[in-house]
Amino acid sequence: MIKQQQKVVLYVDGKAVKNSTLDPATMTYRLQAKGFVTSATQKVEMVMSKGSTELKRITVKVTEENPTSYTLTADDYQIGDTYISGTYDKAATKVVLYVDGKAVKNSTLDPATMTYRLQAKGFVTSANQKVEMVMSKGSTELKRITVKVTEADPTNYTLTADDYQIGDTYISGTY
């Protein structure tokens, strides 16, 4: 049982840095480690002592912070389409089109709908190119995704005809 004279202290790289708060009723301790433990490579220990006598020392397993999961999507792009569009995360300040590893065009962001759009026609000319959208906050890259690019379907022709009335001069339509 922990007695009032006992304490549990956070040690980082061999140095005592912070006393914990003890709860004798539940036999638990707690302390704010943020700012003291900053890397998984640090040696982090909790030391229980009574007065100046060390009673027990344990090593704390430290893991790196999980990377933030940012949202970035891109609609499929077919060669010949005018735009690439998609959604982006509120943390971003820009979304840029990269083709074969080079930044080629900034997108227009719509913060109301969290969507972006940019004119890709002329930049994306082949399904063999590596096409990516890169989302950043300032100069810090947050997320990078690959855009699915397909060749235009040469058999996907459009042909329409307006109704024709006997006696009209022309038949017209669209192609």
Image: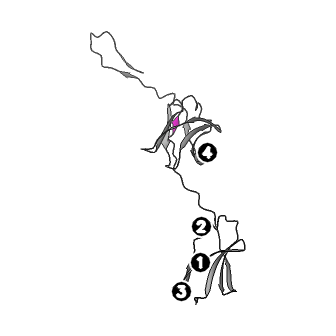
Residue 80 percent coordinates (x, y): 52, 29
**Secondary structure character of the magenta stretch overall:** loop
> Position of 22 compared to 174: left or right?
right
Kind of residue sitting beneath label 1: Ser
The quadrant where residue 151 appears? top right
Disc assigned to residue 90: none
Front-lying residue, 113 or 145: 113
> Magenta stretch containing residue 75, yes or no?
yes
Residue at image mark 1: 20
**Which residues are the magenta region?**
69-78
The C terminus is located in which quarter?
A: top left
Mark earlier in primary sequence (2, 1): 1
Q: Disc 4 on helix, strand or loop?
A: loop
Sooner in the amino-acid sequence: mark 3 or mark 4: 3
What's the CA distance linking mark 3 and mark 1?
Answer: 12 Å
Residue with the mark numbered 2: 34
Task: Check if mark 2's residue and mark 1's residue have beta carbons within 8 Å.
Answer: no
Q: Is 44 rendered above or below residue 142?
A: below
Say what amino acid the circle numbered 3 marks: Pro
Instruction: Report the disc number at residue 139.
Output: 4
